[in-house]
Amino acid sequence: MKLDPTSLKLFVSVVEEKTIAAAADREHIAAAAVSKRMTELESTLRTKLLTRTNKGVEPTAAGTALLGLARQALRELDEVFFQMQDYARGTRGQIAGWLPGARCELVVRDLRTRGNAEADRRQADGRDREDHADGQLQEEGGGAGGDG
């Protein structure tokens, strides 16, 4: 198995929810599929990430380190999605044309300012990112009866 966003998102959910069953409910996927993903993730990374007990799960030292890395990776993947949406909407990209001298510089500066304002708005609006991540997981992992 290769490292993938779905497994990282499931791992974050398992650690945050403290049980595989609760993480499975949160992510709308079968608990057996979540458990299998966690086992495969530990195998891929060649280290134990979770300590399983009758009360649930706790991250090991490696699991705690992965938690921070996984959250960062998922945020960066979301940013890839949102920046590409800027291209799709036409709010980012190259401008072809001719403008005389200093006026061209003002237009480019204005476009950069608008682009930065849009990026700031997206960063402040975490709900869009969560909605995208949830949709991606459901699409890849299937419904509650899916095997992920």
Image: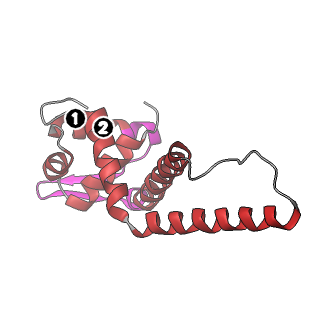
Category of crowding for the residue at label 1, using alpha-carbon neighbours closer than 10 angstroms: few (below 14), some (14–19), many (at least 20): some
Q: Residue 130 location in percent, x, y?
A: 32, 56
Q: Give the crowd class for mark 2: few <14, some 14-19, many >=20 residues within 10 Å.
A: many
Q: Residue at x 56, y 47 (%)?
A: 90
Q: Which residue: 52% across, 48% down?
A: 80
Three-letter code for the amino acid on which mark 1 is drawn: Ala
- Please tell me how many numbered marks the rendered image carries: 2
- Residue at the disc numbered 1: 33
* Magenta-drawn stretch contains 59: yes
Kindly identify which numbered label has been placed on residue 93.
none
Helix, strand or loop at disc 2? helix
Residue span colored magenta: 41-64
Quadrant where the N terminus sits is top left
In the image, residue 117 lies in the stretch drawn in magenta: no
Specify whether 114 is left or right of 59: right
Circle 2 residue: 37
Do residues under tags 2 and 1 come within 8 Å of each other at their CB atoms? yes
Q: Is residue 96 visible?
A: yes
User: Which residue is pictured at 77% across the width and 46% down the height?
Assistant: 97
Q: Is residue 3 left or right of residue 59?
A: right
57 or 69, which lies in front? 69
Position of the C terminus, as image quadrant, is top left
User: In the image, what residue occupies the spot 12% across and 31% down?
Assistant: 145
Q: Secondary structure at mark 1?
A: helix
Image location of residue 52, percent across then percent down = 21, 52
Q: Position of residue 38 (x, y in %)?
A: 30, 42
